[in-house]
Image: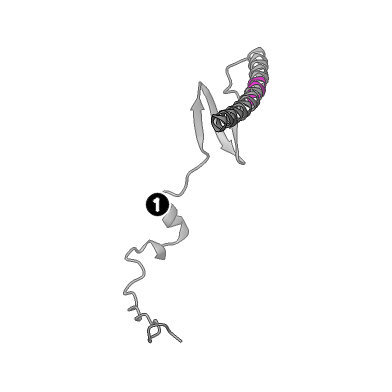
Amino acid sequence: MPLFGKTFSPKKTPPRKCASLSNLHSLDRSTREIELGLEYGIPTMNLAGQSLKFENGQWVAESGSFTGNRREMQRLRKRNQQLEEENNLLRLKVDILLDMLSETTAESHLMEKELEELKNRSRRRK
């Protein structure tokens, strides 16, 4: 039973006159690709003098495009590993400092609470 006496009944919407004003839907696939430019090819980019292409979900260096040598790659990998280790050490130090801060804060709150209790006791005695 409705609360206000009548049930909700929306008006019927009029039918649409035309689904689309474009005639591109009637064209075949090859004509649409030419018309709309859907032939992309392989994505490529040039980054720091190195040419990369996107294949199978990965960015891959094009053959012969890397100008560096093997020693440079090993040096960069070693430096990367050093930086990762340093980053892990710094994260550990931050965690330890946060633990120390929370412990000190908790002790401070307890001392403040004890001080307030002592003040209240001394006031009651007077």
* 54 in relation to 25, above or below: above
Give the side of residue 51 with respect to residue 33, left or right: right
Using the image as rendered, state which of residue 111 and residue 37 is in the foreground. Answer: 111
> Looking at the figure, which quarter contains the C terminus?
top right
Query: Alpha-carbon neighbours of circle 1 within 10 Å: few (<14), some, or many (≥20)?
Result: few
Specify start and end residues of the magenta stretch as a single range. 89-95
State the image coordinates of residue 95 (x, y, percent, origin top left).
65, 26
Which SS class for mark 1?
helix
Instruction: In this rendered view, identify the residue nearer to me: 117 or 94.
Output: 117
Q: Is residue 67 above or below residue 40?
A: above
Query: Which of the 4 image quarters holds residue 50?
Result: top right
Quarter of image, res 75: top right
Magenta stretch: helix, strand or loop mostly: helix
Q: Position of residue 91 (x, y in %)?
A: 64, 24
- In the rendered image, residue 60 lying in the magenta stretch gets the answer no
The residue sitting at 40% across, 65% down in the picture is 26
Q: How far from the left and from the top, in percent, is residue 56? A: 62, 41
Q: Decide if residue 45 is on the left or right side of residue 26.
A: right
Per the image, the residue denoted by label 1 is 36
Q: How is the image coloured?
A: one colour
Placement of 56 over or under 90, stated as above or below = below
Residue 61 seen in render: no
Q: Residue at x 38, y 87 (%)?
A: 5
Residue 94, position as x, y percentages in the image: 62, 23
Residue situated in front as seen by the camera: 7 or 30: 7
Residue type indicated by callout 1: Leu
Foreground of the two, 96 or 29: 96
Whether the magenta-drawn stretch holds residue 94 is answered as yes
Q: Residue at x 60, y 41 (%)?
A: 57
